[in-house]
Image (cartoon, helix red, strand yellow):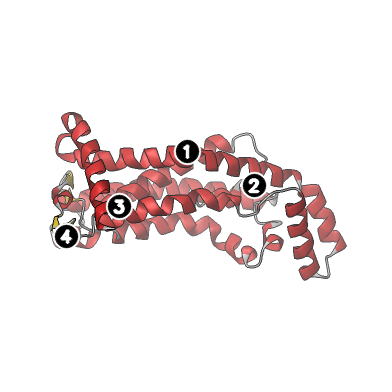
Amino acid sequence: MSAFMSLFADLVGSIADLLQPVFHASAMAAAIVLFTACVRLLVHPLSRASARGQKARAKLSPQIAELRKKHAKNPEKLQKAVLELHAKEKVSPLSGCLPSLFQLPAFFLLYHLFSSSRIGGEANALLDHKLFAAPLGGRWADALGDGGVFGAQGLVYLGLFAIVAAVATFNFLRTKKQMAAGTPGAGGDAGEQIPGMGAMTKVMPFMSFMTLFTVAFVPLAAALYVVTSTTWSAVERAVLYRDMPVGAGALATAG
């Protein structure tokens, strides 16, 4: 693991060296943003496949409506019938979760890299890098202890919080609209597809705001990954689901 982390640290450092003439002292922060973009490009085929799956689910709406009528008094049979329908049509109700799951290793790599005081037996030089005044290995609590909310470091976090809040609000309004439409994937049939999904759809509109807590408690480098990835997801979904019926892409909002 230590050798792998050293290789990863060298990779991020090399990207920062290439960006240094443009971004100067914030080159490492820019390297993390670029690294995140590369990860999202690699995951993009999964996102496209997820969108195709959501479109396929949308086409099953009439059949699911018939199953609801047929098994209105027997929720267990309804759930089983819906799952069988998805299996028959080769449509996964959880396809929208795959892009998020495949990003987790990259996030935890950055988290570990900027949380470790030593890498490969040597002092972790990456911790010396900053985004403006805020150290990439620091956290919001450190910023509050050094100048407060409106101090030099605190203002960096306020900027990130503002971006996250804007993206989260966009996702919130979009998901609420999708769920209110009652079309496939917006919560109308999701509750009968798999156990526990009904409860999940109730809290789904608020999930994007959880990113604010993540940004506040992880190292700034990992927070940059989260902010960049979340913003990418919002734009990507707006493009991939632009020609879908309202509500068909709601289960893909967690990317």
| Residue 86 at x, y percent in the picture | 73, 53
Distance from label 4 to label 1 (Cα)?
A: 35 Å
Mark with earlier residue (4, 1)? 4
Distance from label 2 to label 1 (Cα)?
A: 17 Å
Q: Residue at x 51, y 51 (%)?
A: 172
Distance from label 2 to label 3 (Cα)?
A: 34 Å
Mark with earlier residue (2, 3)? 3
Q: Residue at x 47, y 38 (%)?
A: 235
Q: Residue at x 46, y 54 (%)?
A: 208
Q: Residue at x 85, y 60 (%)?
A: 69
Kindly state the secondary structure of the residue where label 2 is placed.
Answer: loop
Q: Which residue is mark 2?
A: 247
Q: Is residue 75 left or right of residue 223?
A: right
**Residue 117, numbered circle:** 4
Q: Amino acid at mark 2?
A: Gly
Give the number of the mark in front: 4 or 1. 4
Distance from label 3 to label 4 (Cα)?
A: 13 Å
| Residue 116 at x, y percent in the picture | 21, 60
Q: Between residues 113 and 7, which one lies in front from this camera angle?
A: 7
| Residue 225 at x, y percent in the picture | 34, 48
Mark with earlier residue (3, 4)? 3
Q: Between residues 235 and 76, which one lies in front from this camera angle?
A: 76
Q: Amino acid at mark 4?
A: Ser
Give the number of the mark in front: 2 or 3. 3
Q: Amino acid at mark 3?
A: Leu
Q: Which residue is mark 3?
A: 110
**Residue 87, numbered circle:** none
Locate the N terminus and report the quarter of the image it occupies.
bottom left
Q: Quadrant of residue 212?
A: bottom left
